[in-house]
Image (cartoon, rainbow, N blue to C red):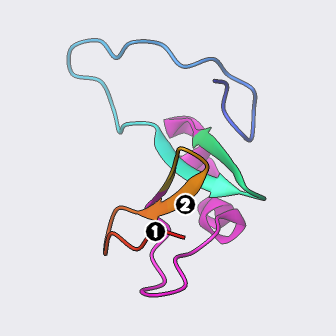
Amino acid sequence: MPCYRCDRVQTDPGPGAGPPWARGIVDGTQILICPECQETDADWVSDLETCPRCGSTRLSIVMGSRVCRQCNNDW
């Protein structure tokens, strides 16, 4: 899956790699943000959906449901 912002393709991190790729949900689709886009665009988090229970952006999609990795809310 490519980066949501720049379409860069994710590769396996090498030794001493920088920050990891971030995961989130935008418009009902799970996306990835590369480390470079995380560093150059501080506003990338504002695009992400949030958990209706706790407000976290640490979400994933499992079997068609959104699941919060912070509070385990499933909707």
Check the image and report above or below for 10 versus 36: above
**Callout 1 environment at 10 Å: few (<14), some (14 to 19), or many (20+)?**
some
Check the image and report above or below for 52 versus 19: below
Q: Earlier in the sequence, mark 1 or mark 2?
A: 2
- Residue at 75 percent across and 26 percent down: it is 7
- Residue at 66 percent across and 66 percent down: it is 43
In the rendered image, residue 26, in percent from the top left (x then y), is placed at 71, 57
Q: Amino acid at mark 2?
A: Arg
> Looking at the rendering, in which quadrant would you find the N terminus?
top right
Which contiguous range is marked in magenta? 33-59
Task: In this rendered view, identify the residue nearer to me: 41 or 49.
Answer: 49
Check the image and report above or below for 51 versus 54: above
Q: Quadrant of residue 48?
A: bottom right
In the rendered image, residue 57, in percent from the top left (x then y), is placed at 50, 68
Disc 1 secondary structure class: loop
- Residue at 55 percent across and 60 percent down: it is 66
Disc 2 secondary structure class: strand
Residue receiving disc 2: 66
CB contact under 8 Å: marks 1 and 2: yes
Q: Quadrant of residue 10?
A: top right
Residue receiving disc 1: 74
In the rendered image, residue 75, in percent from the top left (x then y), is placed at 55, 70
**Callout 2 environment at 10 Å: few (<14), some (14 to 19), or many (20+)?**
many
Q: Please identify the residue farthest to the bottom as the structure is shown.
A: 53
Q: Is residue 48 magenta?
A: yes
Label 1, label 2: how far apart the Cα atoms are:
6 Å
Q: Amino acid at mark 1?
A: Asp
Horizontal side of residue 29 vs 73, given as left or right: right
